[in-house]
Amino acid sequence: MIWFNASYLWFLLLIPILAGGIYWIKRRDENLRHRFFDQRLINQLRRGFWKTGEKLRLVLLFSALLLFVIGLAGPKIGTEVRDIEQRGADLLIILDLSRSMNAEDIRPSRLEKAKFEIQRAIERSHGDRIGLLVFTGEAFVQSPMTQDHSALRMFLDIAETHQMPTSTTSFRAAFEKAKEMFDGLEERRDAARVILMISDGEDHGEPFSNSLQALTRDGIFIFTVGIGTVNGGRIPLYERGSNELIGYHRDRDGREVITRLEPETLREIAAAGNGNYFEISTSTAGIDPFLSRLDDLQRGEFTTEEFADYVNRYQMLVLTGLVLFITGLIVPEYRKEERTEG
């Protein structure tokens, strides 16, 4: 058995306190009556008093209070299996983890800002299956398509540029791996299939037009988000496992590399993928326009799943408590005495 809100069980402590207070008041009143009045007068004034009825009333009222408190805590006993209709879209997020994503022209960095916006998209999602694909010169599945968004957040949190084996960028590798993921995914009737690619737009790989067309032929919508500024920024280098800055990335001639947002390629990808291009060029910008577009897309019904959960049993407790409470209110403390003829 588990409880919906076990903190309400602390109110059970009020029952013995209340019972003790009532007992003390009654003892005090009884002592005062015997102090100022004769017992025969008391019996005369309280003719017809039914002591058993008084006790029965208190027992019923306190029993009702006990059941109310337990019902308020929400006991869940046993399990039931229910059919749950899952509705939503299949959303694959493609995140650029190239070294240039560490640039800090967008605070705190391009990568950290991208991860923050992805977290917002996950929080706004209800019923969507979401996957995370990371890429540089190669692409890897960081998280498969799942409705377990807590696990997805964990995989997103540990995504860092230093985990990738190469520092170049290949959109073709990302699109080919995305095609593999969607091909291996069980299709959901009428569910929108969407890709959200977040990158600074730098691409040093082979042409990707064929791999992009393979996705669009499958009816997959592709949206892109360019993150960075046209003025660009240096790429900081930090000590592994710490926040200690040890310098900035340099080219072979020893000059500091300035990485800039290159939106043209991302615009072309979005146009070919029947999506839209969005841009995060300031720290206050976000992906809200994409989230609005995602809401507008057709959201299909996922296959019905069996879902086992504990059954809340508070209803019978509250109903029984209500019956006891009403009964306690109508139990008489006085009853008519039968007169005897002398």
Image (spheres, rainbow, N blue to C red):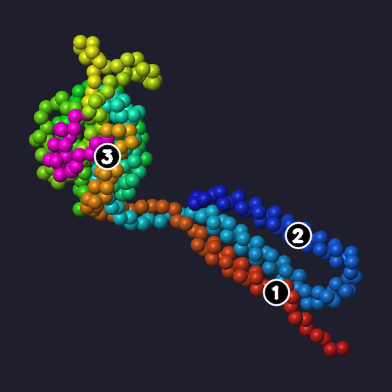
Q: Is residue 211 visible?
A: yes
Q: Is 25 left, or right, of 119 in this rendering?
A: right
The location of residue 257, given as percent across then percent down, is 23, 18
Q: Residue placed farthest to the bottom in the image?
A: 341
- The answer for how far apart the CA atoms under marks 1 and 2 are is 19 Å
Res 104 → quadrant:
top left
Q: Which residue is mark 3?
A: 131
Callout 3–callout 1 Cβ contact below 8 Å:
no
Distance in Å between CA atoms under marks 3 and 1? 67 Å
Please determine whether, in this image, residue 169 is positioned above or below residue 62: above
Q: Position of residue 12 (x, y in %)?
A: 62, 53
Task: Tell me the SS state at disc 2.
Answer: helix
Please say if 42 is above or below 17: below
Label 3 neighbour load within 10 Å: few <14, some 14-19, many 20+: many
The numbered mark, 1 or 2, whose residue comes first in the sequence reads 2
Of the two numbered discs 3 and 1 on the same chain, state the one appearing first in sequence. Answer: 3
Residue 299 rendering spot, x and y as whole percentages: 24, 52
How many marks on residues? 3
Q: CA distance from mark 3 to mark 2?
A: 64 Å
Residue nearer the viewer, 283 or 73: 283
Sequence-first tag of 3 and 2: 2
Per the image, is 205 magenta? no
Q: Which residues are magenta?
A: 261-280
Answer left or right for 233 relative to 241.
left
Q: Dot 2: within a 10 Å radius of its alpha carbon, few (fewer than 14), some, or many (20 or more) residues?
A: few
Task: Confirm whether the magenta stretch covers residue 262.
Answer: yes
Q: Nearer the viewer, residue 322 or 92?
A: 92
Q: Which residue is mark 1?
A: 332
Q: Amino acid at mark 2?
A: Tyr
Quadrant position of residue 284: top left
Q: Which mark is residue 23?
A: 2
